[in-house]
Image: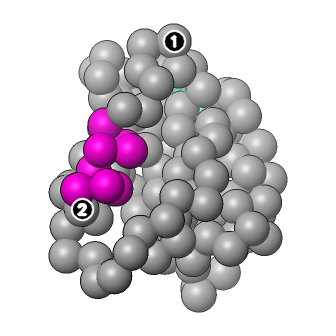
């Protein structure tokens, strides 16, 4: 798996993404059961509210080889501050439309 991770820009001050790197390395959380190596193609943020720029970020990640786009848990689960993104559903939809059916989308990481 080659995964590009998109995180919440607003949450960066609270979390440097340690948990995401950990679960990829250990194959925990959303990566449990993944066969073979997992490479992180890129780790970027959504571009800020209201999340429209996530499309551009996802496009670049796929251009650079990502076969999977993972939305970090800060977006839909609100980790670690209990504040989910109010734009998450729409953001996911436009990213999914952009990257197409060949790219797997994960809605959380851990
Ligand atoms: S759009 Fe959502 S994920 Fe992006 S910065 Fe705003 S709250 Fe965070």
Q: How far apart are labels 2 and 1 at the CA level?
A: 25 Å
Where are the magenta residues, as a range? Answer: 19-26
Q: Earlier in the sequence, mark 2 or mark 1?
A: 1
Instruction: Answer with left or right where residue 85 lies relative to residue 110.
Output: right
Q: Is residue 93 visible?
A: no
Give the quadrant of the N terminus: bottom left
- According to the picture, the residue beneath numbered tag 2 turns out to be 27
Residue at 54 percent across and 32 percent down: it is 8
Residue 76 placement: quadrant: top left
Residue 45 placement: quadrant: top right
Q: How far across and down, in percent of the image, does residue 98 sit?
A: 73, 70
Instruction: Answer with left or right where residue 6 lies relative to residue 18.
Output: right
Instruction: Answer with left or right where residue 71 lies relative to residue 54.
Output: left
Could you classify mark 1 by the number of other residues whose Cα lies within 10 Å: few (under 14), some (14-19), or many (20 or more)? few
Q: Is residue 7 visible?
A: yes
Q: From this view, report whether residue 92 is shown above or below residue 79.
A: below
Local SS, label 1: loop
Q: From this view, report whether residue 87 is shown above or below residue 57.
A: above
Local SS, label 2: loop
Q: How far across and down, in percent of the image, does residue 62 sit?
A: 70, 70
* Magenta stretch, main secondary structure class: helix
Residue 91, label in figure: none
Residue at 53 percent across and 71 percent down: it is 2
Residue 13, label in figure: 1
Residue 21 placement: quadrant: top left
């Amino acid at each position: 798996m080659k995964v590009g991770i998109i995180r919440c820009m607003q949450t960066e001050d609270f979390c440097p993404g340690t948990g995401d790197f950990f679960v990829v390395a250990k194959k925990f959380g959303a990566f449990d059961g993944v066969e073979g190596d997992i490479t992180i193609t890129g780790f970027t943020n959504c571009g800020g509210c209201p999340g429209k720029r996530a499309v551009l970020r996802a496009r670049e990640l796929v251009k650079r080889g990502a076969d999977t786009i993972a939305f970090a848990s800060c977006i839909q689960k609100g980790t670690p501050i209990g504040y989910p993104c109010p734009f998450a559903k729409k953001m996911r939809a436009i990213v999914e439309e952009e990257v197409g059916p060949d790219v797997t989308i994960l809605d959380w990481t851990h």
